[in-house]
Image (tube, grey):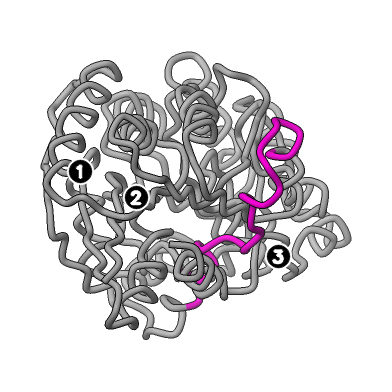
Amino acid sequence: MKKILVAFGTRPEAIKLAPVILELRKYSDVQTRVCVTAQHRQMLDQVLGLFNIVPDIDLNLMQSNQTLSEITASVVDEIDKVLKEEQPDIVLIQGDTTTVMAAALASFYNNIPIGHVEAGLRSNNLYSPFPEEMNRRVTTILSSYHFAPTDRARFTLLSEGIPENQIYVTGNTVIDALFMILEKPVPNVVKDILNRVEILGNGNQQKMILVTAHRRENFGERFEDICKGLKSLVEKNQDIVIVYPVHLNPNVQEPVSRYLKDMERVLLLEPVEYDAMAHLMNAASIILTDSGGIQEEAPSLGKPVLVMRTETERPEGIVAGIARLIGPCADRIVAETELLLKNEIAYNKMAVAVNPYGDGKAAKRIVEILLSNI
């Protein structure tokens, strides 16, 4: 019997690996073991519960105010112990977090092949996103199986010297997860949020703008500018309500509270579970984000995405015209959002439900490739 160890630590990893884990568990001749580092404890647990996945190994490594060096060291050390005990045939990881890079390093030290889901993404700026760009480049060097979500990602890997027979274009598993969730009923928490949006609109027809912003490279002055832009946007447009689930990181919480807490028509929420976020995206008119996953998901819903970053490792959406890179810049946040609010032609050009990132069958492809190779 073949043994596959799936290792992850954050909510985005869990979302994108859940369809793969569920697909692997259909095979009785494969032992699938799930190991979580819990780099993000609370948000990770929400997703695990949503997909009914119980980890076999929970390292519970999250500490308050831990540095990147501390996270890296603890993940390498603890994953190393797991690998020596479990002796898997392959370690499957996803994305570009510190858990991913450190797990790849530990696997390499133990001479265990690595399968990298969502391989080949690049911003081509080593420091943005930080540290994710470095994490995924290191992971590429160490991996044996590269599951690229798009042809562009495949070409990137080829240009870096990865052998063609190690690269597989599968689509992105986040689309699999999104479709699975949208088949479920709208959660009550989303119904309550939409009722509150209607109340904030004082009975008038309001356009809901969904905001997510939390990336490390935007902390500080850039995040201040994001908050200023959102504040100005609400002040200038009486027909919008901003819904913003605020990340728990103090570098996000403090400026958001200072600029937006007491504003009318701004609904600040605790972080919501993934199913709620999926349904909120579906209800939104426009999405403002610095998240990678949302850039991939929103096109399937026909939602224009304005990306509040200076670079993106997901250019396919930009090229397709369904996303626009506007930077963490107050003036552009206002100008680009108002363009979509007031210009129906501009809005409709972006609101095309054509997704370059996948068709919802990526997990099945990944599992079939794994089982034919290990």
Q: Nearer the viewer, residue 133 or 253?
A: 133
Q: Are marks 2 and 1 in contact (CB under 8 Å)?
A: yes
Q: Quadrant of residue 208?
A: bottom right
Q: What's under tag 3, amino acid-wise?
A: Asn
- Which residue is drawn at the image coordinates 62% and 63% (left, top)? 170
- Which residue is drawn at the image coordinates 50% and 76% (left, top)? 179
Q: Is residue 301 left or right of residue 136?
A: right
Frontmost of labels 3 and 2 is 2
Mark number, residue 91: 2
Is the residue marked by circle 2 packed among few (<14), some (14-19), or many (20+) residues within 10 Å? many
Inspect this view and state whether residue 68 appears.
yes
Q: Circle 1 sits in a helix, a strand or a loop, which is it? A: helix
* Distance Cα–Cα, label 3 vs label 1: 37 Å
Q: Nearer the viewer, residue 66 or 353?
A: 66
Q: Quadrant of residue 41?
A: top left
Is the residue marked by circle 3 packed among few (<14), some (14-19), or many (20+) residues within 10 Å? many
Q: Residue 289 at x, y = what percent?
A: 55, 43
Q: Nearer the viewer, residue 47 or 234?
A: 47
Is the residue marked by circle 1 packed among few (<14), some (14-19), or many (20+) residues within 10 Å? some
- Which residue is drawn at the image coordinates 43% and 62% (left, top)? 374
Span highlighted in magenta in the image:
157-179
Mark number, residue 153: none
Going from the N terminus, do you reach mark 2 or mark 1 first?
A: 1
Circle 3 is placed at which residue position? 355
